[in-house]
Image (cartoon, grey):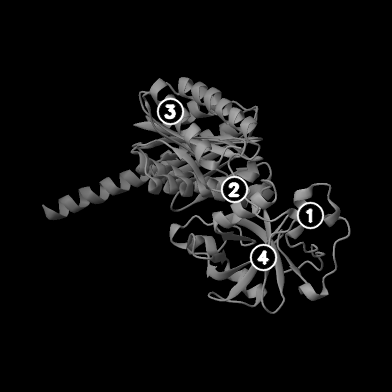
Amino acid sequence: MTRKKLSEGVAAVAESVAVETVHTEDLKASLEEIKGYDGVIGYILRNSTSAAIELKDPSKLIEYAILSSSSLDAGEELSELFNLGDVKHIIINGKNIKVLSMTFSENKISVFIEKHGDLEKVLEKLQSFRG
Amino acid sequence: MLDKEVYSTALKDALDEMRNACPDIQNAFIFTETGEIIAGDADISEKVMIRVIDAFDGVMERAEALGGIESVTIEGDRGTVTLSRFGENYLITAASEKADMKYVGTLTRVLIPTVLKVLEKLSPTPTKKAIISPKPAAEVEIEPLEVKEEPLEEIEEGARMEKPIEESKPEPDSTKSTSEALTVEPKATQLMVENLGGLRARGFLFPSDTVRIDSEILSEWENVFGGKPVEFVDIETFDGKVLRCKVKPIKDLKYNSKGVVQMSEKMQLALEIKKGELVRVKPVFE
């Protein structure tokens, strides 16, 4: 009986990991599609085990990576301070570039878009992952 | 001229009116780019405002990569927090999930800049303290500006090591500025070296070519120079080593008004000094 329960538990964990992997792969596929949108200059997708970075200008990689991390940290901190609940998204409007950051379970993403780019279209596409 | 208190009161009234017009705005406050809180609503504590500014600090520090920041919106299940930039001032609004964010946006974009413009017209340097100079300009100590030479390779861009002051030559044109304010140089301030803590010290969240000093000292310097922001300072050791670096106000309350200058360990190494030692810090206007 105990062995059966253990076996069921392992199967559940394995399934959960598989779902998570599929989720990450789906996200990555969507981000690849988003990368082709007009004005999108790249994205960062990271979780506890991996990171995918696609930027048209790799020289900005470190700056963008820190900005992405800072914006998600700020979101968590401010959510706690103002009781915002789960953070749906963070939008940074820069003078030249906009950044959309979101968290999907353990996946954290940031999409970098030029000023003229359609952020709403990107947001709409990504929100489908909220289910 | 309006003093800081009147300016702050006018903005506080504007924030209260904004909340009256839209009760879904739960909190609102305004701070400057140096991190100084100008006005906040009655329902938000200074401690929370400081934590909010600190939370945005990392984003604002890195926003240069985006060409500078215009606004930041954090949308949660139960509300939205927005940071909006109006010139040198930043407005934070926290609204409930019921709030019509388009209306909130329109309200803030119309009301706050209008009030700021009116205050600017009434006072040219409203966010700064009024300049109180008991001495006429001629009696104020005037020192020639040092020539900046020999960039130090080990230090990141923006920070430069200079020759000791004794070897420096006066810069021929910089002292002949048409602006009267620029002919007056504030005296250097003696401060104690303090480490930048945590991630900041390792340059992850804070550039290692930047030091932090008390916002009050920065304000005083800015007042002497007619409101011109202080972006660079010269750090001078008692051995005569001088390092030019960027400057930001101290955010950590426990170090405020303690007469310290926070700098990275890398910078301390370059200056051959360590925590607890005294240095002279002088503003640079380029």
Please, what is the three-letter code of the amino acid marked with disc 2? Answer: Arg
In the image, taking residue B281 as reference, residue A92 lies left or right, namely: left
Residue at mark 1:
B183
Q: Residue B279: image x %, image y %?
A: 62, 72
Query: Label 1, label 2: how many angstroms apart (C-alpha)?
Result: 33 Å
Return the chain for callout 1: B
In the image, taking residue B256 as reference, residue A32 lies left or right, namely: right
Query: Label 2, label 3: how many angstroms apart (C-alpha)?
Result: 29 Å
Q: Are marks 4 and 3 on the same chain?
A: no
Q: Are marks 2 and 3 on the same chain?
A: no
| Disc 1, SS | helix
| Disc 2, SS | helix
Query: Label 2, label 4: how many angstroms apart (C-alpha)?
Result: 29 Å
Q: Residue B280: image x %, image y %?
A: 65, 69
Q: Determine crowd level at label 1: few under 14, some 14-19, many 20+ residues with C-alpha closer than 10 A.
A: many
Return the chain for callout 3: A
Query: Label 3, label 1: how many angstroms apart (C-alpha)?
Result: 61 Å
Residue at mark 4:
B188
Residue at mark 3:
A128
